[in-house]
């Protein structure tokens, strides 16, 4: 089969590789679309902790089931599906306590241990496979995964009806957090970013106000004007830079919550840490999603509560995977979500 193989630092090569074969409890999926995630970009530039070459990356996937193993019961050939790209052990402390996304022995799609979706075919354990409505495009199917991150982030941050939310970073995950926060009942959302294009998308998916961090204005003034002078109820950090965390601690109100959603490349240096104690803040870590979050994401898209189509800015053939990774990394063109497709 044809695949885009991560062969080394900043290098993706289109190669012919062996097609994976499903085990008795697995299905074989013909990949129709696969999204480029920030975690793949971190691997591309050599800063991801476990996505290392050589590997076929890609974990945001939608496609068609073309073969099922002898033990598979809930999935059939012809089903249109997406995949929760976390295969868990089911027996560790976290799996047994209802937090399987924190499994200590889980395997992630798009790593050497589980061939990813930047290939024509991918296998998945039946428990990870989720059917999508026939009305969904394959691009909408891909967007269920990043939206599941937004759903999980909003749940962890306990965003409630009537609250005011500041989202620091309006890339693909930031946009999904904005959309999920609006769906959860946030009445005022202020989004920041360094690119006006992203801020335009932020408005489309639910932000009532936006702020370009490269402008000469004051973020504090924008928070006071758009939310309240005391600060946001919840701040969601979706850009993985130290100064952004400092902004979160400054611009959240006393007794507020700060959710760290972004993936940070290295050690985190927190400026103004006294705000955590002085304001009695809850600083919340966010890691991927729970399985149920995918079903919530599907419902939000199906019911028209979240427009994920507006977040998809580029749809490229798999042969242009190198360009896709460079595009997302370098921001050479206005982009939010870049998707690779197969003929």
Image (cartoon, rainbow, N blue to C red):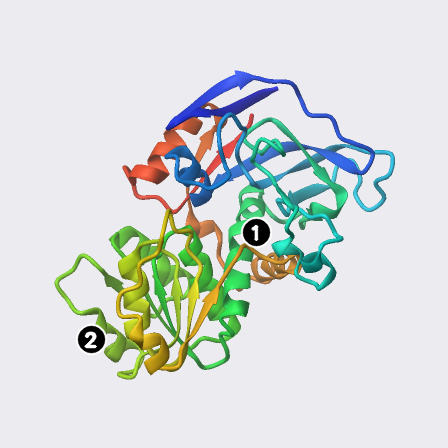
Q: Is residue 335 above or below residue 123?
A: below
The answer to which image quadrant residue 148 occupies is bottom right
Residue 257 location, x and y as percent?
42, 74
Residue 211 in view (yes/no): yes
273 above or below 296?
A: below
70 vs 326, left or right, is: right
**In the foreground, 20 or 92:** 92
Q: State the image quarter where residue 225 is shown.
A: bottom left
Q: Residue at point 48% right, 57% down?
A: 307
Instruction: Give the foreground label among 1 and 2.
Output: 2
Q: Quadrant of the C terminus?
A: top right
If you read the primary sequence from the N terminus, does the residue marked by circle 1 or circle 2 appear first? 1
Frontmost residue, 238 versus 305: 238
Mark 2, Cα crowd under 10 Å, few <14 / some 14-19 / many 20+, is few
User: Relative to 106, is 228 on the left or the right?
Assistant: left
Residue 183 pos. (x, y %): 51, 69
Q: Position of residue 68 (x, y in %)?
A: 80, 34
Say few, some or many: other residues with alpha carbon within 10 Å of mark 1 (under 14 / 14 to 19 / 20 or more).
many
Q: Position of residue 75 (x, y in %)?
A: 79, 43
Q: Element type at marker 2?
A: helix
Q: Residue at x 73, y 41 (%)?
A: 125
Identify the residue at horizontal 39%, vertical 81% (top origin).
280
Residue furthest left in the image: 216
**Residue on which disc 2 sits:** 221
Front residue of this view, candidates 231 and 277 = 277
Callout 1: SS = helix
User: Disc number at residue 144?
Assistant: 1
In the rendered image, the quadrant that contains the N terminus is top right
In the image, residue 301 sits, relative to residue 219, either above or below, namely: above
């Amino acid at each position: 089969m044809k695949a885009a193989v991560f062969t080394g630092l900043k290098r993706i090569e289109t190669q012919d590789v062996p097609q994976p074969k499903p085990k008795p409890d697995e299905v074989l999926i013909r990949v129709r679309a696969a999204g480029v995630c920030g975690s793949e970009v971190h691997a591309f530039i050599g800063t991801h902790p476990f996505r290392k070459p050589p590997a076929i990356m890609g974990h945001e996937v939608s496609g068609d089931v073309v073969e099922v193993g002898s033990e598979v019961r809930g999935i059939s050939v012809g089903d249109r599906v997406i995949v929760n790209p976390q295969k868990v052990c089911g027996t560790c402390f976290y799996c047994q306590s209802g937090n399987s996304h924190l499994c200590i022995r889980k395997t992630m799609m798009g790593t050497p241990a589980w061939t990813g979706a930047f290939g024509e075919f991918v296998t998945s354990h039946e428990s990870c496979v989720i059917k999508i409505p026939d009305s969904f495009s394959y691009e909408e199917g891909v967007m269920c995964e990043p939206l599941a991150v937004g759903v999980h982030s909003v749940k962890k941050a306990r965003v409630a009806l009537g609250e005011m939310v500041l989202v620091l970073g309006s890339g693909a995950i930031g946009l999904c957090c904005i959309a999920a926060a609006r769906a959860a009942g946030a009445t005022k959302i202020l989004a920041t970013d360094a690119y006006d294009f992203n801020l335009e998308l932020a408005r489309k998916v639910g932000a009532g106000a936006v702020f370009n961090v490269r402008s000469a204005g004051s973020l504090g003034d924008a928070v006071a004007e758009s939310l309240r002078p005391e600060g946001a109820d919840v701040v969601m950090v979706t850009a993985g830079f130290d100064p952004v965390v400092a902004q979160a601690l400054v611009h959240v109100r006393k007794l507020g919550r700060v959710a760290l959603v972004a993936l940070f490349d290295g050690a985190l240096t927190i400026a103004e840490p006294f705000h955590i104690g002085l304001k009695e803040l809850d600083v919340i870590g966010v890691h991927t999603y729970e399985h149920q979050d995918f079903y919530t994401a599907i419902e939000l898209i199906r019911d028209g509560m979240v427009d994920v189509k507006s977040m998809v800015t580029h749809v490229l053939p798999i042969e242009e995977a190198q360009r896709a990774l460079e595009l997302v990394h370098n921001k050479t063109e206005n982009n939010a979500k870049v998707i690779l497709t197969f003929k």
